[in-house]
Amino acid sequence: MDQRRLSIVLLAFFCASIIPSIAQAATITSCTFDRTPYYPGQTGSIAVTLYNDQASKIRITDLTAAINYYYNNEVSYQQTFLSNATLPVQVQTGINQTLYIPFSLPTNIAPGCTQLSVAATVQLWNNSTGSWNVYNEQYPSYSPTLYIESPYKPQLLSLQATNNATTIMMYLLAFTTVLFAGATAFFYLVARRIRNVRQNVA
């Protein structure tokens, strides 16, 4: 009976040493764009923050962002961008690590909102074996929304600004004309009254 219990304990210890925890080794807590909105043809960057919530260190071996978007002719396309960091990057327990993914948008991309798929490949350090758990990688992910503005909006805003300025000038011109006409009528009446007074005195 004691030998059976000992065997069970040894088996459990062995499994714990070779099988990594199924808990998430890291969590992507945020994905932040360097600006918003974007216009077709622009380049940008995503700041991806990962948090190590494990009892041992981890390393990030891969970090990508896949963008699904449509062209103006409604043809769908997917493009994957890689992090500009030198990987792998180790992250100690309880530490946030921010990495960046640069990307570029095609000039004929359709405006609107599109969902990105940001994914990392993470390995957990096994303190028992003193090695990385390369056979049980984990893949934390995040899905930020990218907003692409119409390329005609700046022209529309410029046209609206021009129209607003023209409207204001027209109002000022009308006000000035009315003011001048009123002043002219006032001075005419004053001059006429003075002339009548002089004639009466004479």
Image (spheres, rainbow, N blue to C red):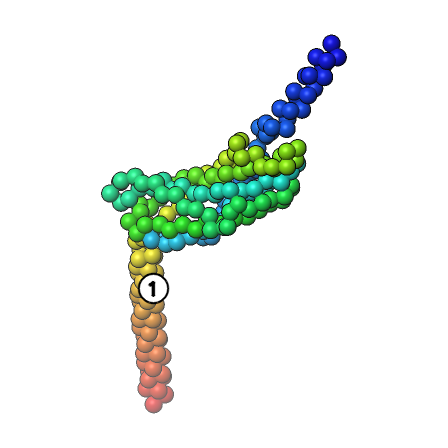
Residue situated in front as seen by the camera: 72 or 95: 95
Indicate the position of residue 157 as horizontal and vertical percent values.
34, 57
Location of residue 2 in the rendering, given as x and y in whole percent from the top left corner:
75, 12
Extreme residue toward the left, this view: 73
Q: Quadrant of the N terminus?
A: top right
Residue 156, above or below 31: below
Which residue is painted at 52% across and 32% down in the image?
Answer: 135
The part of the image, by quadrant, that contains residue 196 is bottom left
Q: Residue furthest top?
A: 1
* Percent x, y of residue 97: 57, 46
Q: Which residue position holds label 1?
A: 165
Q: Quadrant of the C terminus?
A: bottom left
Residue at x-position 34% and y-position 57%: 154
Residue situated in front as seen by the camera: 195 or 182 = 182
Most distant residue in the right direction = 2
Say which of 106 and 93 sits in front.
Answer: 93
Q: Residue furthest front?
A: 3
Q: In this picture, is 190 found above or below 19?
A: below
**Which of these two is toward me, 26 or 69?**
26
Seen in the picture, residue 139 relative to 177 is either above or below; the reply is: above
Q: Residue at x 30, y 52 (%)?
A: 107
Q: Position of residue 77 (x, y in %)?
A: 31, 40
Q: Say if residue 164 shows up in the picture.
A: no
Q: Is residue 23 left or right of residue 112?
A: right
Q: Residues within 10 Å of mark 1 (few under 14, many from 20)?
A: few
